[in-house]
Image (cartoon, rainbow, N blue to C red):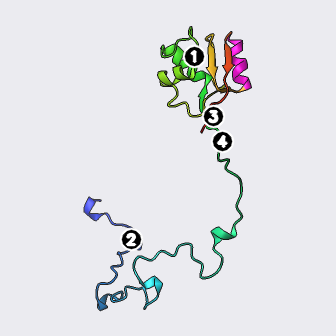
Amino acid sequence: MKLHELSDNPGATKKRKRVGRGPGSGTGKTGGRGIKGQKSRSGVAIKGYEGGQMPLYQRLPKRGFNKPNRKAFAVVNLGLIQKFIDLGKLDAASPITEDALVASGLVRRKRDGVRILAKGEMTAKLDLHVTGASKSAVTAVEQAGGTVTLAAAPASE
């Protein structure tokens, strides 16, 4: 078998339909769109329209509630804090504040405060000053001999 002998299975490929290329093509003049009407025109988008019937997106019930003033915290795991201490980007001897976490590059921005979660191992003795922490994160830091000081979340107005 040679490269020029290769061919696709019969019926596997179809020729492209070239619309609007003269009367001999079978799809000339109106190009298979019929005569007149909205769908024969160009630039028509009637995706959600159901011809007078109530559209599906209006028939379905609304669900849930988005709290307009909810707090968005920057989330940090204990394992990442430990990794940054091991790399020397954070100093475990001094108190670790939210500003120190931002300066080290662990958190991009504070948002409504930094919240600590307990994923990962904590071995260093830390003095954390953050807005929030999960109960398991607080116990993990205290088991390692450190302390967690929680500050009130700043008003987001």
Q: Mark 4 or mark 3: which comes first in sequence?
A: 4
Specify start and end residues of the magenta stretch as a single range: 135-144
> Which residue was labeled with disc 1?
96
67 up-or-down from 81: above or below: below
Q: Mark 2 or mark 3: which comes first in sequence?
A: 2
**Identity of the amino acid at label 3?**
Ala
Determine which quarter of the picture holds residue 145: top right
Q: Is residue 33 magenta?
A: no
- In the displayed structure image, the side of residue 106 where residue 71 appears, left or right: right
Disc 1 to disc 3: CB gap under 8 Å: no
Q: Mark 2 or mark 1: which comes first in sequence?
A: 2
> Which residue was labeled with disc 3?
155
Residue depth check, mark 2 versus mark 4: number of the one nearer the observer: 4
**Identity of the amino acid at label 4?**
Arg
What residue is rendered at 54% in x and 19% in y? 83
**Would you call the spot at circle 3 few (<14 residues within 10 Å), some (14-19), or many (20 or more)?**
few
Residue depth check, mark 1 versus mark 4: number of the one nearer the observer: 4
Q: Is residue 142 magenta?
A: yes
> Which residue was labeled with disc 4?
70
For label 1, the SS is strand
Residue depth check, mark 2 versus mark 1: number of the one nearer the observer: 1
**Identity of the amino acid at label 1?**
Ile
What residue is rendered at 68% in x and 26% in y? 133
For label 2, the SS is loop
> Which residue was labeled with disc 2?
13
